[in-house]
Amino acid sequence: MKTMRAKTAFLGMLLMAAVAAGSGNPATVVAALAGKPPHVLSELEAVVGPLHRDPTKWADAVGPLYRVSPRAGVARATVELAIDPFHRDPPKVADPSLRHWDLDFLSGREACQRLLAARFPRPRELRVDNRRIVRFGDLYLTDLDVDGGFRLSWYDREPLFAIPLRSANETVKLVEALTAVANAGFTRQAVVAHLGALTPDPGRNADVLRTETWELLYEPSGAARPQRFTVSFKRPLPARELLPRLGVQRPAVRSGDTHLQSRTLFDLAKGISLKTGYWLPAAGGYAISLGVDPQGLIETRERLPGSPVWSADGAQIISFDAFPAPSIR
């Protein structure tokens, strides 16, 4: 019933926005964005007007795009494109997906905030650099210094500032839970006991567990032991907390892909693991791949075939992926 009332209220606000003040009214733009946030460039242009991306110019082909007054009511647009230049030729991508966009408006903050609240009845207020940001679903409204001005933003992945901080005590508990699950061989029983109940996701033939700071994928659905166990950390986990629990003695970071874009932890003291045949840590009969954030890593003088080596000091884990290694099945 509450959901129906919220939808009815939003439709009423949408109608008012459409007829009250014409194409120059920020509410008209915001109503369209709230109804269906654009995920590709053509969808965004249908709302804010042409952004005149010229794929023959490299800066336009890869973005970001910076445009002033693309249409009446929109003061400025900043648009980041989601194109992988290693696997796609940006000039040949006619309608690229979007990674993030900001739209600035010089007026209409209160009216647009009411409209967004009707569409997303559970807003959450955030503070970033002492500036107020209100989250409405996947849209973020930021107060600008102009009276009545605001910025509306969207991200293809939840931004770090929107993810709650994890206390030191919560970090310790999470590390202890992951260690217990690993030592138990990543069994379903251990996962439920230490991390929480799993929910089936039929579309992916997997079970999932979602929290505010991390998400777990357990494949295949219903299995007593997984073929793949993956935790994605929306807020990174300090490597120094977890690595000693996994028996890593001399942690370092390497890249394992052709384009040297990934960053994965390994143990310089062990090289190739005799237990798994991999250079990854291992526990409970599984090899464990720990992906880390590349930001802030310092390259060392060590060298491996096909990859530089970075120091693991201060490394932040963004993914924990466990899979049965062939030699220990």
Image (spheres, grey):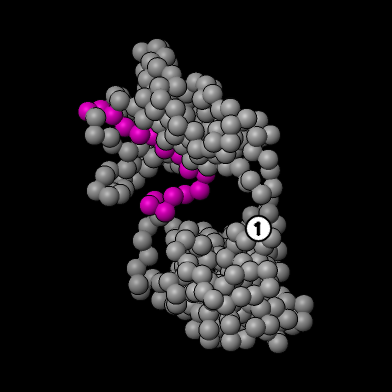
Where residue 57 appears, as percent x and y from the top left, is 58, 31
Q: Nearer the viewer, residue 235 or 199?
A: 235
* Residue at disc 1, secondary structure: loop
Residue 188: in sight, yes or no?
Answer: no
Where residue 318 appears, as percent x and y from the top left, is 51, 64
Looking at the rendering, which quadrant does residue 257 occupy?
A: bottom right
Looking at the rendering, which quadrant does residue 274 occupy?
A: bottom right
Q: Residue at x 70, y 63 (%)?
A: 220
Q: Give the residues drawn in magenta, as a range.
A: 147-162
Looking at the rendering, which quadrant does residue 320 occupy?
A: bottom right
Vertical comparison of 137 with 329: above or below = above
Where residue 73 appears, as percent x and y from the top left, is 37, 20
Decide if residue 314 is on the left or right side of residue 86: left
- Indicate whether residue 14 is drawn in magenta: no
Decide if residue 323 is on the left or right side of residue 34: right
What number of labels is visible?
1
Q: Residue at x 61, y 30 (%)?
A: 55
**Amino acid type of disc 1?**
His
Residue sitting farthest toward the front:
301
Q: Nearer the viewer, residue 55 or 177?
A: 55
Q: Residue at x 58, y 36 (%)?
A: 58
Quadrant showing the N terminus: top left
- Indicate whether residue 157 is drawn in magenta: yes
Provide the residue designation for mark 1. Answer: 259
Q: Residues within 10 Å of mark 1 (few under 14, many from 20)?
A: few
Vertical comparison of 170 with 54: above or below = below
Vertical comparison of 262 with 62: above or below = below
Where residue 174 appears, as percent x and y from the top left, is 45, 72
Quadrant showing the C terminus: bottom right
Residue 240: in sight, yes or no?
Answer: yes
Q: Residue at x 24, y 30 (%)?
A: 146
Q: Nearer the viewer, residue 200 or 86?
A: 86
